[in-house]
Amino acid sequence: MNIQEKKKMKRTKILKSARDLFVEKGYDEVRIIDIAKGAGVGKGTIYEYFNGKDEIVEELLNQSFKIYKEKCDEILKEDISIEKRIRKFLYMESNITEESFINIRNIIRNSGILQSDMSTIVVDNIRTMWKYKFKFVKELVDRGLEKGELRQMDASILTLFIVSATHGFLYYKNGGFFHAKTDFNFDVENMDEDLFMEMLLNGITNQIIKSSTEIKTS
């Protein structure tokens, strides 16, 4: 293993240690010495790679978006139906890897990051992710409309519907604050993704959905 490979491996260990500790203890409670111990390096070594915790979080966010984008791009490359693409999108978001946004969100939550100088970087990064998510789903919708796999509706409205529905479902399923404030006794861990997909793709009524024109005139 050459010097560059060793440096890359050490940097990866530092980032993994930091991510694990941030999730376990919260950003504010983790010290650089803690990250160093977790990575099996000296405290001074951390500063050879990063200026401090803020820069480590920024790098974790950048990595998260890169991983997220790669997974979305893989779905776009597959020659499959719109239904299968949307299912893959949902399952990708639901089974999101530990390197991705679900843990980054947990790191940010209950920390002082958004009240610090890091707030702009964090918010901009999250906005970039959301912009890409809408762009990705819009591409799925456009292809579905072009192939006649989706009802002929406004592509932007369809995109907003899919993104909003999947985000709401998964945010609740993954422990978003919403479910803690409701009186519904949901079995969160066993919420049925297949049933959600059925409702998303085929609706929740047993009648043919009327067009907006028919609704206005009825």
Image (cartoon, grey):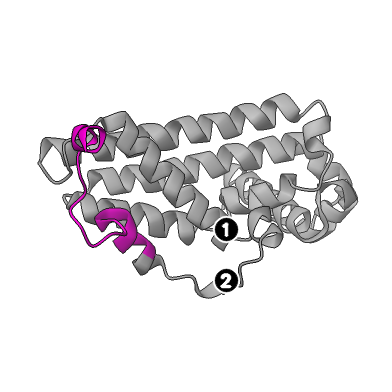
- In the image, which disc is placed on residue 120? none
- In front of the other: 138 or 26: 138
In the image, what residue type sits under mark 2? Phe
Place of residue 151 in the rendered image (x, y in percent of width and height, measured from the top left): 17, 42
Answer yes or no: do the residues labelled 1 and 2 have beta carbons within 8 Å? yes
Whether residue 82 appears in this view of the structure is yes
* Residue span colored magenta: 196-218
Residue at point 68%, 32% (across, down): 122
Figure check: 69 above or below 179: above
- Please tell me which of labels 1 and 2 falls first in the chain: 1
Place of residue 29 in the rendered image (x, y in percent of width and height, measured from the top left): 89, 51
- In front of the other: 48 or 162: 162
Residue at point 20%, 38% (across, down): 211
Place of residue 37 in the rendered image (x, y in percent of width and height, measured from the top left): 84, 58
The quadrant of the image that shows the C terminus is top left
- What's the distance in space between the residues labelled 1 and 2, CA to CA? 10 Å
Q: Residue furthest front?
A: 218
Please give the residue where the numbered disc 1 appears in the rendered image: 172
Whether residue 51 appears in this view of the structure is no
Place of residue 153 in the rendered image (x, y in percent of width and height, measured from the top left): 21, 34
Is residue 96 located in the magenta-colored stretch of the structure? no
In the image, what residue type sits under mark 1? Tyr
Q: Secondary structure at mark 2?
A: loop
Q: Quadrant of residue 69?
A: top left
- In the image, which disc is placed on residue 186? 2
